[in-house]
Amino acid sequence: MIRVPRPNLDGFTLALLATVGLASVLPVQGPAAEGVHWVAEAAIALLFFLHGARLPREEVTAGLSHWRLHLLIFSLTFVAFPLIGWLVVATLPERLLPPALAIGVQFLCLLPSTVQSSIAFTSMARGNVAAAVCSATLSNIGGILMTPLLVALFLKAQGGGFSLDAVQTIVVQLLLPFVAGQLLRRWVGAWAARHKTLLKATDRGSILLVVYIAFSEAVVGGLWHQVPVESLAMVVLIDSAILTLFLVGTTLLSRRLGFSTADETAIVFCGSKKSLVSGVPMAGVLFAPATAGLVLLPVMIFHQIQLMVCAVLARRYAERDAEARDALPAAS
């Protein structure tokens, strides 16, 4: 009997799909939308505060000395990715990739790397966790300024929004809570570390709220009349191709430059991933409400693909490391 493999969808992915479905059927509008928007902003600020409170400064300090690794990851995230996104958008005709989705693909490539999943996959692969913590954190802090600047550079002619007010909003909503968490870590760090469930719930809940708002506004503006099935399939194909390119590219490049296997895993998982946590609130600030939902589609799809693929890759790294360790006694 032939067994058909089932898609590996986690609870959060199902929640995202349910949120998009809810926004499609019952989009929030009027005064209620303003209230939900306020709650979402507060949840995002709390999320970044808790990230700052939990992040051990010792691990960041330990990883800072590995400047070659950090420079490579930073260049991949904010130079190579944006250029690849620009090339893809410039190459594909509008009939295959509508303008709003094209903006979303480019916006995806302008985002910083993830923090939690990059570190988790590096740890699972038995890689350089300290370097991953440092690089992912630097990427996210740098992304608060770099992403709006890159949006101004790459998307100004395509409807991307940029202004000093937008940067100020992002700094206030993301950077200041993170810094506050770091400053208050002495008093709240241990409590935040013990309550990982709270951080996870805040993380996912804040994203779901912002996604609900963005898609509600997009649905009211006629979202599903603008996106044919073929365009969604094209986005899945593009996201998959971009992820494959960077997974293979980071692996080959790290080996060519002489990095250790432990460093290679940090480069692969930090240099090939994009942050949904940072992308969702930034899209709400940088793009018009009716556009933000469409812009987020490529980001959400890429998020799920990267989680599934990187989970498999991390397990293979771990298995290879275990085999190498088992072979040591026999070789001696």
Image (cartoon, rainbow, N blue to C red):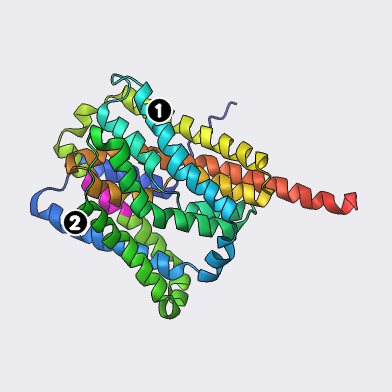
Q: Quadrant of residue 197 in the image?
A: bottom left
Question: Dividing the image into 4 quarters, which one contains the N terminus?
Answer: top right
Q: Is residue 284 left or right of residue 322?
A: left
SS assignment at label 2: helix
Q: Judge the density around disc 2: few (<14), some (14-19), many (≥20) Cα neighbours within 10 Å.
A: some
129 inside magenta stretch? no
Label 2 to label 1: alpha-carbon separation: 37 Å
Residue for badge 2: 36
The residue depicted at 8 percent of the width and 50 percent of the height is: 30
Residue range in magenta is: 207-214
**Given the image, on which type of amino acid does mark 1 rest?**
Leu
Count up the numbered dots: 2
- Residue ID at (37%, 40%): 108
Q: Nearer the viewer, mark 2 or mark 1?
A: 1
Q: Which residue is mark 1?
A: 87
Picture coordinates of residue 326 (x, y %)? 80, 51
Q: Residue at x 14, y 52 (%)?
A: 33
